[in-house]
Image (cartoon, rainbow, N blue to C red):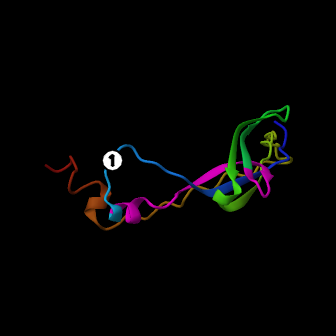
Amino acid sequence: MKNSIHQLAAVVWDDAKATAVEEYDLNEVRTQFHRPARYTTYGLLLVDDEKGVTLASEEGNDQNLRGLTFIPRAMVVEVVFLGRARAKRKSRPKRQAAGPQPASPKPAPSRPQSEDPSSQGGGLGSDDEI
C-alpha cells in the first residue's frame, strides 16, 4: 500500500429529510420535523472549493478512487482534517540482546509460620481433627 496524497477528513453537513406517509399537525411539523438531518461523512478529501466537498472512501494502489461523495457547499457545516493515511509499518524482527542474559529473579523469602492454628494446616477444613 502506498501512502495517499489525500488528507483524511470528517465533513459535518445538513441533509434534507423526508418521512413515509404519516400524519402530523402543524405544531408537530414545526417542533419535530422542520430542520435538517445532520450527518458526518468520513473519507479522503479530494476537493474542497466553493461548489462543495468531494470525498472518496477508497483509493487503489494505482491512485484510482472509488466510493465518491459530493456534498454541496451550502449543506456543509464543518470540515475537520484528521491527518494523512499512512501505510502500515512492516514489523521489524526482534533483536537478540548481546552479552550475558540477566540472572533469573531470586525466590521470595519464606514467611515465618503464624501462631494461628488455622494457618498451619489444622483448624477449619482440616482432615486431621474430625
Residue 15 lies, in percent from the top left, at: 56, 53
Please tell me in which quadrant of the rendered image residue 95 appears.
top right
Q: Tell me if 93 is positioned left or right of 41 in this view.
A: right
Residue highlighted by disc 1: 22
Say which of 121 and 42 sits in front.
Answer: 42
Mark count: 1
Residue 5 lies, in percent from the top left, at: 85, 47
Residue 39 lies, in percent from the top left, at: 57, 54
Q: Tell me if 71 is positioned left or right of 35 in this view.
A: right
Q: Is residue 24 magenta?
A: no
Say which of 97 and 92 sits in front.
Answer: 92
Residue drawn at (78%, 40%), measured in percent from left and top? 91
Please tell me in which quadrant of the rendered image residue 124 appears.
bottom left
Residue drawn at (61%, 57%), measured in percent from left and top? 13
In the displayed structure, 22 sits above or below 123; it is above
Question: Magenta part of the protein: which range?
Answer: 28-53
Q: Tell me if 72 is positioned left or right of 7 in this view.
A: left
Amino acid residing under circle 1: Glu
Residue drawn at (81%, 36%), measured in percent from left and top? 1
Say which of 80 and 71 sits in front.
Answer: 71
Give the crowd class for mark 1: few <14, some 14-19, many >=20 residues within 10 Å.
few
